[in-house]
Image (cartoon, coloured by chain):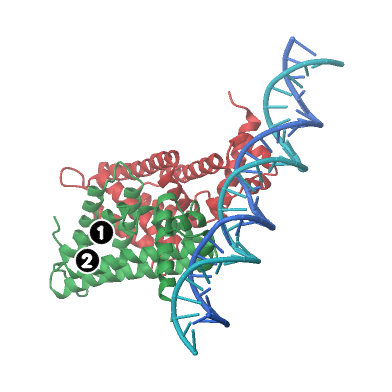
Chain colours: A red, B green, C blue, D cyan
Amino acid sequence: MENQAGDERRAQMLAAAAELIAERGFAQTRIADVAGRVGASPGLVVYYFETKDKLLTEALRHSESAFYVAAEELLHSRSTTAQRLESLVTLTFESKSQADFAGSWGLWFDLWTQAFRHAQVAADRQLLDDQWRTLIERVVRSGIEDGEIAGGVDGVDAEEFAVSWAAYLDGLSVQVALDDPRVDVARAKRLALHFAARELGLNLD
Amino acid sequence: MENQAGDERRAQMLAAAAELIAERGFAQTRIADVAGRVGASPGLVVYYFETKDKLLTEALRHSESAFYVAAEELLHSRSTTAQRLESLVTLTFESKSQADFAGSWGLWFDLWTQAFRHAQVAADRQLLDDQWRTLIERVVRSGIEDGEIAGGVDGVDAEEFAVSWAAYLDGLSVQVALDDPRVDVARAKRLALHFAARELGLNLD
DNA sequence: TGTCATCTTGACTCGTCGTTCAACGGCGTG
DNA sequence: CACGCCGTTGAACGACGAGTCAAGATGACA
């Protein structure tokens, strides 16, 4: 049984850490910053997390899951496959730009960078990415069941689509996040939907 | 007119820095490490680059351009569009895994992370990415000219394809770099070529 | 050979944190 | 009331590493 107040403190600190990482970046986030933001002393932060690295990597892992939770909820309020795909695209390209939302762009880059070298972060990221792809897969499967998408032997392969589309969204996200003049949010959304439409045989315009 | 020996020293240091960033990551690379690797004193590194940040960001920018140079050269030795696309895919997914090659995976993540906050890095990255997309675009255009790909009003839009495909390659690269069990090099290559085949109306199997 | 600019050294300074620790207050329990 | 467990503080410690600097090596050139 875990302590109530203690858990709350931990959660506060994780949230603060995630915000700070999003703002200044992983490497530029200090224990003292996190402490300051939650109105506590540096010592207390260490008391809860032992080391800076544990705090930051846990914050990183923790914050990303919020994105998938949001996605999961979003799907329950949409009924057609087209609407669902559109809301996933909007979530991907618009929610992350908002600084207030947990999964801000800055976090993704640091998450990837850390995952590349840090096994625990890598494992968590992989888990989350799998959730995300499974979610896409479910949308496709329900589309097939409803007859909106062609299934069967030479129809759409849901798993293959999920993997491809997820990768495509990531790639477009990078461009949008880095403010590439040739790929703004509108174009990214259009391209993502064009891809889905073509692969799934839908009309999404 | 720049000094000969001085330029060589600089180049050595940039290369060493890039290697080190690829190995340990941007944040974990010290001036002393770079100095050690080129057999010089820490002071000398500062003498050439003033600050650690200038050294590392310049190394990052410098090393990425090697990738595009390699791509450029590669294209001259292939004649059909299919061959060219295949070699771009191979370059993307295989060269970066090799630690000896300048553009190792680790560098990309750090490049993106830095570009997100560092205007100079962002500008350079954008320039390189544009070069990359232009290169893809050229392949498509020459394919259209040769009649391998349908051009014209309702044919392939080379610019659009370049932007899309580049993003797709990036997204797949992330998965491969992070060792995702569902996206290994072979699958990434297959998916990338499938995308190109479908968008360009080619047969690439 | 003398002079001067450039390159090079490595010991040193100095800030900046991460982490430790002794002490304190509050609170539940015996 | 006394004891002890948490949560909490914040000053202090210590490590690490960027950047400085005074001094020396090197080499070009007159």
- Residue A195 position, x and y percent, is 29, 57
Q: Left or right: B14 with respect to C16?
A: left
> Three-letter amino acid code at disc 1?
Leu
Q: Left or right: A160 with respect to A135?
A: left
> Three-letter amino acid code at disc 2?
Leu
Secondary structure at numbered mark 1: helix
Which residue was labeled with disc 2? B74
Neighbour tally class for label 1: few under 14, some 14-19, many 20 plus, Cα within 10 Å: some
Secondary structure at numbered mark 2: helix
Q: Left or right: D14 with respect to B195?
A: right
Going 44% across and 71% down the picture, which residue do you hit? Answer: B6
Going 20% across and 62% down the picture, which residue do you hit? Answer: B85
Mark 2 falls within which chain? B
Residue A190 seen from this side = yes
Going 40% across and 75% down the picture, which residue do you hit? Answer: B4
Residues A71 and B97: in front is: B97
Mark 1 falls within which chain? B
Residues B156 and A11: in front is: A11
Count of all numbered marks drawn on residues in the image: 2
Which residue was labeled with disc 1? B91
- Residue A197 position, x and y percent, is 28, 56
Q: Left or right: B95 with respect to D8?
A: left
For the C terminus of chain A, the image quarter is bottom left
Q: Quadrant location of residue C10? A: bottom right
